[in-house]
Image (tube, rainbow, N blue to C red):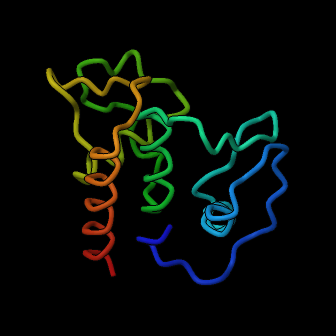
Amino acid sequence: MNALKPAGKGVKLSFTDSIPVWAQTSIAQALEAEIVQGYKDKTFRPSASISRSELVVMIARAAGVDRAATALTGFADDSKIPAWAKRAIAAVKELGIVSGRNGNLFVKNETATRAEAVTIIMNLLQTKSKFE
């Protein structure tokens, strides 16, 4: 959220789990911008690792891309990508924000590394600046 520089403090947090004080404003802003939603059990799970699928869905929301455009990602493991993430992954890949790992695999359930997250966020910022 710091990279996106949102205005305001965001919405009130109502998750059932504890959110660290240092993260509360960013999470509240991400909720307000509809970048994150939390889980169906009303938790946010701030200490959990995120999968590449979850990361790319958040990036697609931050980019404001049309996630209904196509359902084909072009990754070698396309058939293994969950339906809830496929359109976002396809849209973000098309913009050049995300790429696959070795063998053109998306590896949907692999944990997103910090290096991948930083690279994807930098690519998002470059893409957004082209449209502004």
User: Relative to residue 92, is residue 129 depicted above or below?
Assistant: below
Residue 75 or residue 6, whichever sits in front:
6
Horizontally, residue 51 falls left or right of residue 96, namely right
Where is residue 125 drawn, in percent x and y?
31, 68
Where is residue 8 drawn, in percent x and y?
65, 83
User: Relative to residue 6, is residue 14 depicted above or below?
Assistant: above
Where is residue 31 drawn, in percent x and y?
67, 60
The quarter holding residue 40 reads: top right
The quarter holding residue 4 reads: bottom left
Residue 25 or residue 22, whichever sits in front:
22
Residue 1 or residue 58, whichever sits in front:
1
Q: Residue at x 38, y 16 (%)?
A: 79
Q: Residue furthest front?
A: 21
Residue 103 or residue 79, whichever sits in front:
103
Q: Residue at x 27, y 46 (%)?
A: 115
User: Relative to residue 81, is residue 14 depicted above or below?
Assistant: below
Q: Residue at x 51, y 56 (%)?
A: 61
**In which quadrant will I find the C terminus?**
bottom left
Where is residue 65 drawn, in percent x and y?
43, 57
Horizontally, residue 50 falls left or right of residue 132, namely right
The quarter holding residue 38 reads: top right
- Counting labels gives 0
